[in-house]
Amino acid sequence: MNETALIQELKQGNAQAFTRLVEAYQHLVYHTILNIVQQTEEAEDAAQEVFVQVYQNIKSFRGDSKLSTWLYKIAVSKALDYERKKKTKKRIGFIKNLVGIGTREEETISDFHHPGIALDNKEAAAVLFKALKQLPETQRVAFTLIKADGLSYDEVSTVMNVSVKAVESLMHRAKENLRKILHNYYSAND
């Protein structure tokens, strides 16, 4: 698929071009979001919102980066929006529970199982995903894009709008923090 021609067709409002775009990038977008939000329903909703946003804003795409990089930026942004909404709902639910007007919602993150993980690795993956949730947002995003999505440091710097040195630093801190979190987890479970 010629990316330049696809972008031109999209800018002209060609519905078939949009279908090709969705078919070509839906898995990339969905899995990127899923690795961040760790909820399949939220990932599906956010992925749909990404393509709606692309459809609405394709005319503003200047081509400064690859189309896939632009999609990664939008996908990460949507995923982080979902994460922020989730945190806000939890805070409100906690406050409601404190004053006796709400019900306690169960945490579902520990039950998350990524569909791409082999059955014999599900338990280890669940521990890792739980540990990732404890990382600061920027470290988690950098780690996920590099380790789960296979992006290069250059691509991640473009997606996150930071320097390559900043991505290297985020990865170093993410690895250190994960080592501590996982060490504490495994020490406590021995």
Image (cartoon, rainbow, N blue to C red):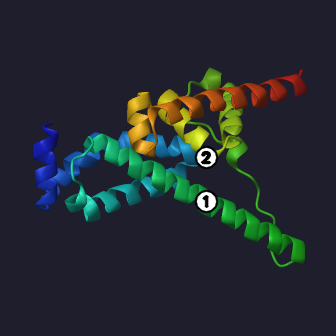
Q: Which of marks 2 and 1 is nearer the N terminus?
A: 1
Q: In which quarter of the image is residue 152?
A: top left
**For the point 51% across and 52% down, which residue is it?**
79
Give the image location of residue 63, x and y in percent. 21, 47
Q: Which disc is residue 190 wearing?
A: none
> Is residue 97 rendered to the left or right of residue 51?
right
- Tell me the mark number nearer the camera, choosing from 2 and 1: 2
| Kind of residue sitting beneath label 2 | Glu
Residue labelled with disc 1:
84
**For the point 56% across and 36% down, which residue is it?**
114
Depth check: give the residue in front, 111 or 61: 61
- The quadrant of the picture occupied by the C terminus is top right
Alpha-carbon distance for marks 2 and 1?
A: 10 Å
Local crowd at mark 2 within 10 Å, few (<14), some, or many (≥20)?
A: some
Local crowd at mark 1 within 10 Å, few (<14), some, or many (≥20)?
A: few
Find numbered disc 2 in the image and state the secondary structure of the residue it sits on: helix
Residue 129 in the image: above or below residue 21: above
> Is residue 10 rendered to the left or right of residue 35?
left
Regarding residue 115, the answer to whether it shows in the image is no
Residue labelled with disc 2:
137
Depth check: give the residue in front, 80 or 125: 80
> Is residue 97 rendered to the left or right of residue 45?
right
Residue 151 in the image: above or below residue 106: above
| Kind of residue sitting beneath label 1 | Arg
**For the point 40% across and 48% down, which residue is it?**
73
**For the point 61% across and 37% down, which residue is it?**
113
Regarding residue 72, the answer to whether it shows in the image is yes
> Is residue 23 rendered to the left or right of residue 183?
left
Give the image location of residue 147, x and y in percent. 52, 27
